[in-house]
Amino acid sequence: MKLLIHWAISALFLYVLSVLFNGIVVESVMAAVVAAIVLGLINATIKPFLQVISLPITVLTLGIFYLVINGLMLLLVSALVPGFTVNGFGTAFFAAIILSLLNAIFVRNE
């Protein structure tokens, strides 16, 4: 049940990002839900591997490179999910910052 609620909140956040950024397009509610599910799966599987590999550069940049990884994950979701589009890395980078802030404020990790 918690997982479904988390996916619904993530879908809502992705829709909010599409309102805030002209470069993000969510064509339907279903596209937002599928994008949220795919983003969750990617964050659970691929992202930890990338974080370990990029640890030296993350340390050198004082953690800023972590945001680059988040932006890359959004671009990957955009490539995989029809109806969810992110135009360019700059948009993905700043959207990842906002998405991280929204998750930190509104999603309680237990």
Image (tube, rainbow, N blue to C red):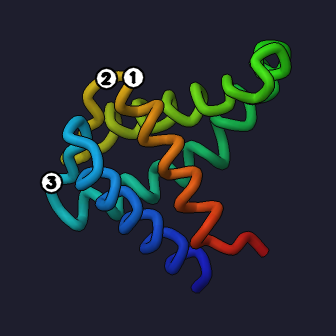
Mark 1 element type: helix
Classify residue 30 by image quadrant: bottom left
Q: Amino acid at mark 1?
A: Phe
Say if mark 1 contacts mark 2, CB within 8 Å. yes
For image coordinates 46% across by 58% down, the residue present is 37
Residue bearing mark 3: 27
| Residue found at the far left of this picture | 27
Q: Amino acid at mark 3?
A: Glu
Would residue 57 appear left or right of 23 to someone viewing this image?
A: right
Q: Amino acid at mark 2?
A: Gly
Say if mark 1 contacts mark 3, CB within 8 Å. no
Q: Position of residue 103 (x, y in %)?
A: 58, 61
Instruction: Give the answer, above or below, for where 102 lies relative to 1.
Output: above
Nearest to the observer: residue 29 or residue 100: 100
Q: Position of residue 78 (x, y in %)?
A: 33, 37
For image coordinates 28% across by 51% down, the residue present is 20
Quadrant of the snapshot with the C terminus: bottom right
Q: Residues within 10 Å of mark 1 (few under 14, many from 20)?
A: some
Q: Which one is in front in this view, the residue at disc 1 or the one at disc 3?
A: 1
Q: Residues within 10 Å of mark 2 (few under 14, many from 20)?
A: few
User: How much space separates mark 1 and mark 2, taking CA atoms?
Assistant: 4 Å
Residue bearing mark 2: 88
* Sequence-earlier tag: 1 or 3: 3
* Sequence-earlier tag: 2 or 3: 3
User: How much space separates mark 2 and mark 3, taking CA atoms?
Assistant: 17 Å
User: How much space separates mark 1 and mark 3, taking CA atoms?
Assistant: 20 Å
Q: Which mark is residue 89?
A: 1
Nearest to the observer: residue 7 or residue 23: 23
Q: Residues within 10 Å of mark 3 (few under 14, many from 20)?
A: some
| Residue found at the far bottom of this picture | 1
Q: Position of residue 89 (x, y in %)?
A: 39, 22
For image coordinates 66% across by 42% down, the residue present is 45
